[in-house]
């Protein structure tokens, strides 16, 4: 089946595409396709947005994935959290194509408070791209996506980029793999989507020279372009312009647990990654995928730290050039044990790291979740919400990445009350170890903004345990 093409998805004429390929790409694939890795490790965090500083005058956020039309594949709710000790106003704008006037609404957000905005209440659209502009104060933005009884929550982006990377797509039977491309700018973007498989690079014609019109969001059904691939690495590269890219996975339950997952891409490979949210409960299967988008064969060093103050022996994993390698972590960790993962790669061959986890019976609820690792570290990490609603449960995890013991505490704020932080018991965390904060046990409401803080650098993430499963890292507050 050929990919579906909506009115905003088109390819440039062949001559223009050929000229762009000649100008920008080199022959580099073992499979004989044209591909330009042009990959370097970034010095700044690349795997997720950071929280703006407390004295920020303004900030802008971009939410790529989600729908706001009846029967859409991922109904979207924006979650805005104000980290400042004074109220602020945000403007939520929905863009739905270069031919339509943007629809906007202002929202008041209390000091240390949270505001949820259902995108369809601003505009119903099959392809909405959302911009959140904060006029003052430090603000972080996430969004919740829902489809039937399944939901997921993850970060929106603070920046657009020419390139976006994903490591763990899935187009096997029973899966939908959607790539959302959002161009919030006044000029069209021209995009190539290249795939890494375990057999090398693939560049189908249907994924080349895609036009993402100005002020538009385009959804690309990867499960119709490149079938029966898992894991699937994805490189989104704009020949012209910049954009925001987010990937969502949906399993209908016919070939594994049903569920919905989303992940914001990384803007560059990196040489050091951490995943703080490993879960080895009964019925869980966790797979860590490492994607090598360079032309150099490499190996990575994989470390796993367990919650019982032990660590698994370090493992060397080979990752050939322009392909992927996967490690099934659930085969290494005893059931019932939580864990954190660290991946290190040589400087000349940075990688992209993504964790996919599924939960089947006897786990309850069953589900699907994915998250890229993080490359950042900070003494404070923020979350717009701890859990999607009060009917479910969730936990936050903090990994001590310093070389000394740290004290980590959780602050859960009451909206409008700067003197309100309700803290879970502070935890002493040894060097390299992990602390877990169960939100239901600590009485944290879904409407509360949460900060994990320590007296040294940590990495922090969230695991939503129900009613649907979700994994994500937090927003580091960088100096």
Image (cartoon, grey):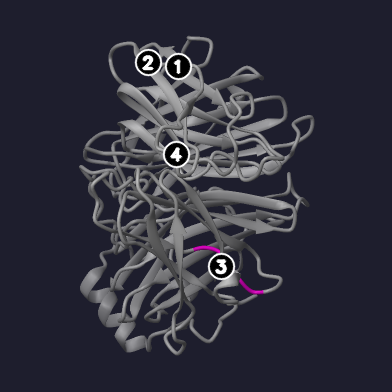
| Secondary element type, mark 1 | loop
Precedes in sequence: disc 3 or disc 1: 3
Q: Quadrant of the N terminus?
A: bottom right
| Secondary element type, mark 4 | loop
Q: Is residue 277 left or right of residue 19?
A: right
**Tag 2 and tag 3, C-beta contact below 8 Å:** no
Precedes in sequence: disc 2 or disc 4: 2
Q: Disc 4 marks which residue?
A: 417
Where residue 465 appears, as percent x and y from the top left, is 65, 35
Q: Which residue is painted at 26% across and 34% down in the image?
A: 346
Residue 68 among those drawn in magenta: yes
Nearer the observer: mark 1 or 4; the answer is 4
Precedes in sequence: disc 2 or disc 3: 3
Where residue 66 appears, as percent x and y from the top left, is 56, 64
Q: Residues in magenta? A: 65-69
Dividing the picture into quadrants, the one containing residue 278 is top right
255 and 75: which one is in front?
75
Alpha carbon distance from label 2 to label 3 = 39 Å
- Would you place residue 410 above or below residue 94 in this image? above
Q: Disc 2 marks which residue?
A: 407
Crowding near pointer 2: few (<14 within 10 Å), some, many (20+)? some
What main secondary structure does the magenta stretch of the protein show?
Answer: loop
Precedes in sequence: disc 1 or disc 4: 4
| Secondary element type, mark 2 | strand
Alpha carbon distance from label 1 to label 4 = 21 Å
Q: Disc 1 marks which residue?
A: 426
Q: Is residue 163 left or right of residue 216?
A: left
Q: Disc 3 marks which residue?
A: 119
**Tag 1 and tag 2, C-beta contact below 8 Å:** yes
């Amino acid at each position: 089946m050929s990919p579906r093409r909506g009115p905003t998805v088109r390819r440039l004429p062949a001559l223009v595409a050929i000229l762009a390929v000649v100008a920008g790409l080199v022959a580099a694939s073992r499979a004989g396709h044209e591909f330009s890795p042009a990959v370097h490790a970034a010095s700044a965090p690349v795997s997720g947005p950071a929280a703006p500083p407390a004295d920020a005058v303004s900030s802008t956020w971009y939410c790529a994935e989600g729908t706001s039309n009846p029967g859409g594949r991922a109904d979207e709710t924006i979650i805005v959290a104000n980290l400042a000790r004074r109220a602020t106003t945000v403007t939520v704008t929905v863009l739905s194509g270069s031919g339509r006037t943007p629809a906007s609404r202002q929202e008041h957000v209390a000091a240390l408070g949270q505001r949820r905005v259902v995108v369809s209440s601003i505009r119903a659209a099959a392809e909405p791209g959302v911009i959140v502009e904060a006029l003052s104060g430090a603000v972080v933005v996430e969004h919740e996506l829902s489809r039937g009884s399944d939901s997921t929550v993850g970060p929106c982006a603070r920046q657009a980029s020419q390139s976006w990377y994903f490591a763990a797509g899935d187009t096997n039977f029973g899966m939908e793999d959607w790539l959302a491309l959002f161009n919030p700018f006044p000029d069209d973007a021209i995009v190539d989507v290249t795939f890494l498989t375990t057999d090398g690079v693939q560049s189908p014609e249907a994924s080349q020279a895609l036009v993402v019109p100005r002020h538009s969001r385009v959804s690309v059904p990867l499960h119709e372009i490149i079938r029966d691939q898992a894991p699937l690495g994805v490189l989104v590269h704009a020949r012209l312009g910049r954009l925001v890219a987010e990937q969502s996975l949906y399993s209908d339950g016919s070939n594994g647990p049903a569920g919905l997952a989303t992940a914001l891409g990384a803007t560059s490979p990196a040489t050091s990654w951490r995943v703080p949210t490993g879960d080895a409960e009964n019925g869980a299967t966790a797979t860590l995928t490492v994607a090598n988008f360079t032309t150099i064969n490499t190996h990575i060093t994989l470390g796993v730290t367990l919650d019982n103050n032990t660590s698994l022996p370090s493992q060397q994993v080979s990752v050939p050039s322009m392909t992927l390698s996967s490690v099934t972590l659930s085969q290494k960790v005893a059931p019932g044990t939580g864990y954190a993962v660290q991946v290190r790669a040589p400087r000349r061959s940075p990688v992209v790291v993504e964790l996919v986890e599924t939960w089947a019976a006897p786990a309850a609820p069953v589900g699907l979740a994915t998250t890229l690792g993080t490359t950042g570290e900070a003494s404070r990490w923020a979350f717009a919400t701890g859990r999607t609603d009060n009917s479910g449960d969730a936990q936050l995890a903090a990994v001590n990445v310093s070389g000394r013991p740290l004290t980590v505490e959780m602050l859960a704020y009451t909206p409008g009350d700067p003197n309100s932080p309700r803290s879970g018991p502070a935890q002493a965390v040894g060097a390299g170890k992990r602390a877990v904060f169960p939100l239901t046990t600590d009485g944290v409401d879904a409407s509360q903004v949460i900060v994990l803080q320590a007296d040294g650098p940590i990495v922090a993430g969230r695991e939503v345990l129900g009613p649907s499963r979700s994994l994500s890292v937090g927003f580091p507050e960088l100096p």
